[in-house]
Image (cartoon, rainbow, N blue to C red):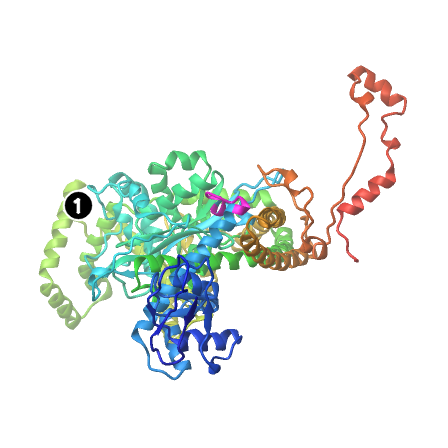
């Protein structure tokens, strides 16, 4: 039977059934030739559609129109009576275009097709493309599922091995303090508008994503009661209604109960308030029209998306990172290093949750990302910043931000689509994202190795010069870090008494200024007028003062001559100094963020212009804040150091503000506060982290090469097994094998570049996967990249066992060796040399 299509007319043509045979009679099918034939002509250039209709031959196995169409390279737009058909090649090209440009939607494709053929836009064409593209992706997922079954990669194998450098552990590899490093964060770009609020009636669609990386809302909600709902306490005391920002996690920490609030208050009020001050001026709200407010995900240090969930009608509530941690512990086990923007606060909540005992038992360690750490206070940094955490190497834990920079482009095409289509688009994006990250893993290792070597060399030269002048060693820097941690841990907080004293002195400052500063009548009248207009405020303050006097049994009210009054003035001076430092730090941190954003690629012109204006404004504000700081610092006893513009910028990058803020004791004489020693300490820990990075990269190189070799073996065996019984599946496997071989060849090229670096201490030899049968490699020819790129050759060594020697007792072994039968000298040295040559890297071939 043949299916006839009419060109450019859209007229109906009846399909003809065979005269005999048990084949169904097909009805009318409307086929638009400008989509079937002209697109076919433009893309495949196999036939000239100007010379008439295409005739699709019927095959006995094709019992439906779609079955016949797909055998000729087309996909229909309906399951039974398709009115449109599109070339499979069209969807293959669109899929790759959408991969590199997520903004390119099927609606844009439909417009482009009509424009190419000088026709008006057809409103139904987009829907037909969506239906056919869904069918295409379903076919591709079916091929992928059958391929994984043939490869023996069923169940959770894919997610258990998604990142070979992180997860493909080998036998006998060196010990790493953290076997796996990753980061988690939320992002609100991938919102989804509630279907109830959209025009029209929503079509029922019960399809859901089957990808292993998703955590369902039900799994997330298991942790919604981990923090008390009945005893909510606001740690941050936000202004009602106007201070919500659902883009950042710490604004939802008011879920915490009273016990957690008391424990976290110190950390939250410093780090979280710091982030709010450094953030944008406008505050975003989560409107009710969004059913999904974004996504929360976890990535490994190489960028692979490990686990992900939707944030349902909320910001980054604590239940999302708790659900992430549970999935990670269940799947990847112990010794995990995980970064999060406010890990310093979240980790305390984590330890109080139902996961707390597992976190401790499995040695999970939290880290604050390196760039976000600039806005955390110094007390937090010395405990959570990657520079001061042993075992993390040079990892910055900022991979989530780089991941979101790509997924943000999906927002325009997913915000108004169906739920399934949104998840499908996200899955497609991150599948390609993971593939790109695997292809870039060789370059990742090369760049990190080069950076580690350069950092060691550069820091070592500078550190040697400083150590000669300071007479210090590595032990001194370790002791200095412990001393600094101890200092901030024991640092007292401002008490309520001091606050009350400062408030009282501020109220009574009027009389003090009249006596000391000699205010004239006009000034006194103006001030008294202002106070009369704020009489209610005066009464409130007076009531607070009376309450304070009654609480502390103060019989007589203080006067400027009282010692208590003078002490309170000192408190006010110190308080003014701290506020000046905080304001200066807030402005400089904001400037640091904006300059970094300004230098990023992909920043639009208007945003770049806005940032430039903000920088100019902020620079002037910084100069004024610097003036106020210097005035407040000079009023202290003893005076604090005078700061210049250059020293402020350096302090921002080194986060040195917090120790300047302490005024109860003069710490400037302590060794760890000296600028030269602090610089040496940063250099020392930079070298230490770089050495850890080299060790981790050496392990990752072996894991990656082992994974590539085992992947080659699995494909070879799968193709050989399916070649006769299922040649179509074998063909699909072969195409995948060829593609992966090309990717692995590029990775191997970067690994060879890494091995040529001066200071390389690793090896390019593959290992054996833990728990995998090493005999699977027997009889399998090596991949081309193993010999042609890595220049490694396999060798078979045969030897004969001496049965007589095996039967000897320990006492007889001595005589056996004395007689010369078991000495090393009796081995053939030429065979040993030949064996080593076969196992070594061949340079010239």
Could you tell me which residue is drawn at 64 percent across and 39 percent down? 774
- Please indicate, yes or no, whether residue 508 appears anywhere in the rendered image: no
Magenta span includes 153: yes
Residue 390 vertical placement versus 431 (above, below): above
**Residue picked out by circle 1:** 548
Residue in the foreground of this view, choosing between 654 and 99: 99
- Please indicate, yes or no, whether residue 231 appears anywhere in the rendered image: yes
Q: Residue furthest front?
A: 20
Residue 774 vertical placement versus 280 (above, below): above
Residue 275: percent from left, percent from top:
35, 57
Helix, strand or loop under label 1: helix
Residue 35 is left or right of residue 286, and the answer is right
Residue 689: percent from left, percent from top:
56, 49
Magenta span includes 411: no
Could you tell me which residue is drawn at 14 percent across and 42 percent down? 550
Residue in the foreground of this view, choosing between 441 and 128: 128
Q: Quadrant of the C terminus?
A: bottom right
Q: Residue 424 falls in which quadrant of the image?
A: bottom left
Q: Quadrant of the N terminus?
A: bottom left
Could you tell me which residue is drawn at 24 percent across and 45 percent down? 497
Magenta stretch, residue numbers? 150-159
Residue in the foreground of this view, choosing between 540 and 802: 802
């Amino acid at each position: 039977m043949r299916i006839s299509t009419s060109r450019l007319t859209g007229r109906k043509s009846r399909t003809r059934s065979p005269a005999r045979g048990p084949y169904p009679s097909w009805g009318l099918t409307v086929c638009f030739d400008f989509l079937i034939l002209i697109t076919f002509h433009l893309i495949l250039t196999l036939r000239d559609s100007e010379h008439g209709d295409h005739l699709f031959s019927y095959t006995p196995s094709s019992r439906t129109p779609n079955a016949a169409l797909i055998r000729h390279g087309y996909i229909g737009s309906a399951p039974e009576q398709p009115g449109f058909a599109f070339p499979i090649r069209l969807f293959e090209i669109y899929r790759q275009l959408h991969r590199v440009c997520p903004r390119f939607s099927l609606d844009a494709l439909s417009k482009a097709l009509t424009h190419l053929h000088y026709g008006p836009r057809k409103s139904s064409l987009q829907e037909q493309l969506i239906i056919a593209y869904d069918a295409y992706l379903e076919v591709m997922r079916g091929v992928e599922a059958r391929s994984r079954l043939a490869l023996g990669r069923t169940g959770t194998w894919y997610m258990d091995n998604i990142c070979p450098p992180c997860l493909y552990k080998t036998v006998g590899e060196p010990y790493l303090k953290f076997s796996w490093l990753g980061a988690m964060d939320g992002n609100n770009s991938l919102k989804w508008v509630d279907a109830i609020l959209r025009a029209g009636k929503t079509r029922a669609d019960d399809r859901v994503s089957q990808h292993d990386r998703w955590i369902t809302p039900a799994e997330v909600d298991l942790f919604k009661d981990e923090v008390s709902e009945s005893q909510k306490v606001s740690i941050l005391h936000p202004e009602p209604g106007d201070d919500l920002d659902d883009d950042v996690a710490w604004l939802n920490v008011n879920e915490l109960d009273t016990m957690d609030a008391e424990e976290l208050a110190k950390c939250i009020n410093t780090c979280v308030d710091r982030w709010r001050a450094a953030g944008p001026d406008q505050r975003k709200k989560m409107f009710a029209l969004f059913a999904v407010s974004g996504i929360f995900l976890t990535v490994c240090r190489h960028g692979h998306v490990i686990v992900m969930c939707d944030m349902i009608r909320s910001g980054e509530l604590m239940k999302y990172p708790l659900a992430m941690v549970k999935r990670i512990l269940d799947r990847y086990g112990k010794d995990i290093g995980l970064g999060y923007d406010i890990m310093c606060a979240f980790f305390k909540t984590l330890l109080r949750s139902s996961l707390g005992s597992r976190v401790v038992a499995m040695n999970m360690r939290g880290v604050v990302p390196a760039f976000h750490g600039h806005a955390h206070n110094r007390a937090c940094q010395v405990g959570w910043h990657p520079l001061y955490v042993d075992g993390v190497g040079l990892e910055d834990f900022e991979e989530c931000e780089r991941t979101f920079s790509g997924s943000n482009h999906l927002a325009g095409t997913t915000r108004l689509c169906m739920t399934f289509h949104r998840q499908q688009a996200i899955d497609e994006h991150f599948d390609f994202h993971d593939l790109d990250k695997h292809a870039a893993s060789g370059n990742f290792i090369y760049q990190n190795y080069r950076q580690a070597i350069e950092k060691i060399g550069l820091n070592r030269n500078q550190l040697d010069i400083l150590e000669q002048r300071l007479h210090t060693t590595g032990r001194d820097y370790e002791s200095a870090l412990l001393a600094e941690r101890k200092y901030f841990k024991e640092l007292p907080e401002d008490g309520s008494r001091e606050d009350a004293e400062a408030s009282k002195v501020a109220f009574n400052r009027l009389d003090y200024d009249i006596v000391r500063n000699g205010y004239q009548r006009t000034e006194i009248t103006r001030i008294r007028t202002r106070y009369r207009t704020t009489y209610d405020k005066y009464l409130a303050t007076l009531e607070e003062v009376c309450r304070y006097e009654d609480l502390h049994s103060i019989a007589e009210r203080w006067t400027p001559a009282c010692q208590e009054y003078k002490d309170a003035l000192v408190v006010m001076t110190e308080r003014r100094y701290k506020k000046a430092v905080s304001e200066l730090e807030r402005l400089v941190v904001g400037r640091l963020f904006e300059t970094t954003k300004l230098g990023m690629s992909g920043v639009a012109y208007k945003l770049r212009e806005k940032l430039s204006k903000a920088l100019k404004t902020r620079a002037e504000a910084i100069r004024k804040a610097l003036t106020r700081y210097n005035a407040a610092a000079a009023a202290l006893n003893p005076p604090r150091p005078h700061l210049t513009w250059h020293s402020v910028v350096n302090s921002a990058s080194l986060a040195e503000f917090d120790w300047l803020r302490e005024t109860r004791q003069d710490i400037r004489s302590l060794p760890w506060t000296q600028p030269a020693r602090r610089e040496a300490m940063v250099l020392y820990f930079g070298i230490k982290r770089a050495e850890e990075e080299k060790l981790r990269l050496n392990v990752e190189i072996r894991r990656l090469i082992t994974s590539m070799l085992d992947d080659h073996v699995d494909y070879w065996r799968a193709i050989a097994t399916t070649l006769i019984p299922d040649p179509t599946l074998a063909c699909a496997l072969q195409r995948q094998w060829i593609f992966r071989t090309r990717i692995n060849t590029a990775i191997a090229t970067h690994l060879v570049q890494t091995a040529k670096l001066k200071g390389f201490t690793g090896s390019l030899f593959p290992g054996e996967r833990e728990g995998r049968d090493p005999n699977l490699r027997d009889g399998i020819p090596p991949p081309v990249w193993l010999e042609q790129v890595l220049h490694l050759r396999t060798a078979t060594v045969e030897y004969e066992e001496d049965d007589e020697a095996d039967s000897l007792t320990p006492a007889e072994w001595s005589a056996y060796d004395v007689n010369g039968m078991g000495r090393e000298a009796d081995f053939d040295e030429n065979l040993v040399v030949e064996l080593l040559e076969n196992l070594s890297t061949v340079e010239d071939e």
